[in-house]
Amino acid sequence: MLEIVVAISLVAVPLTGCAGQQPRREDLKSFGSIDEAYAAVDDVLGCDSKPVGDPVVPMGDGVRLTSSQRLCSEDVQIDLYPNQDALEKSYQTWADSSQGKIPLVRGNNWMVVDLSQIASGQPSSPNIERLAERLNGEYAVVGK
């Protein structure tokens, strides 16, 4: 019984330690345009100059949720949102997806979504987590 209590205690310590590292909602970074968001993401991830394909458009009640989008690479997209409600609906759409695990980073009015695992079966970019740190965003892996 003592081993179980010790194991639970050891597991709990790292989880509480990580909680303090997440920025508060009001501290999350905002961008004024998709070009500004792209430049910031490009600085961290090194986006492709001419990625092939189109971004996946998140929809809510039959309406496009994003105000603008841009691909960073074939499987990584940047979404800019007109308001918090659209951002939250889009986040929930990704979270409810049954396509597989989707790493993403979200800020106050933007989200970077890495669809590498779904599109090609390849692991996501190792820098997506670093993107959250550098751009003061929240990192999450959503989907089922």
Image (cartoon, rainbow, N blue to C red):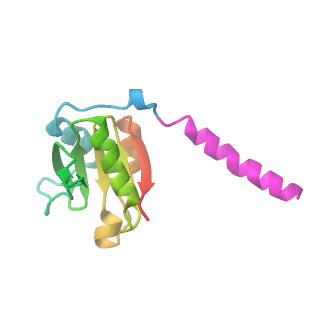
Q: Farthest residue in the right direction? A: 1
Is 137 drawn above or below residue 12 in the view shown? above
Is 68 drawn above or below residue 95 in the view shown? above
Name the residue nearer the viewer: 108 or 136.
Answer: 108
Q: Is residue 18 magenta?
A: yes
Q: Position of residue 120 (x, y in %)?
A: 29, 72
* Magenta segment, prevailing SS (helix, strand or loop): helix
Identify which residue is drawn at 14% across, 60% down: 54
Q: Farthest residue in the top direction? A: 26
Name the residue nearer the viewer: 13 or 110.
Answer: 110
User: Quadrant of the image for the N terminus?
Assistant: bottom right
Identify which residue is drawn at 35% across, 49% down: 91
> On the picture, is 9 further left or further right than 78?
right
Identify which residue is drawn at 22% across, 47% down: 65
Q: Position of residue 5 (x, y in %)?
A: 82, 53
> On the picture, is 22 further left or further right than 132?
right
Which stretch did the figure color magenta? 1-22
Q: Is residue 69 magenta?
A: no
Is 134 drawn above or below residue 65 in the view shown? above
Q: Position of residue 40 (x, y in %)?
A: 25, 38
Quadrant position of residue 144: bottom left
Identify which residue is drawn at 23% across, 32% down: 31
Q: Position of residue 6 (x, y in %)?
A: 81, 52
Is 12 drawn above or below residue 119 in the view shown? above
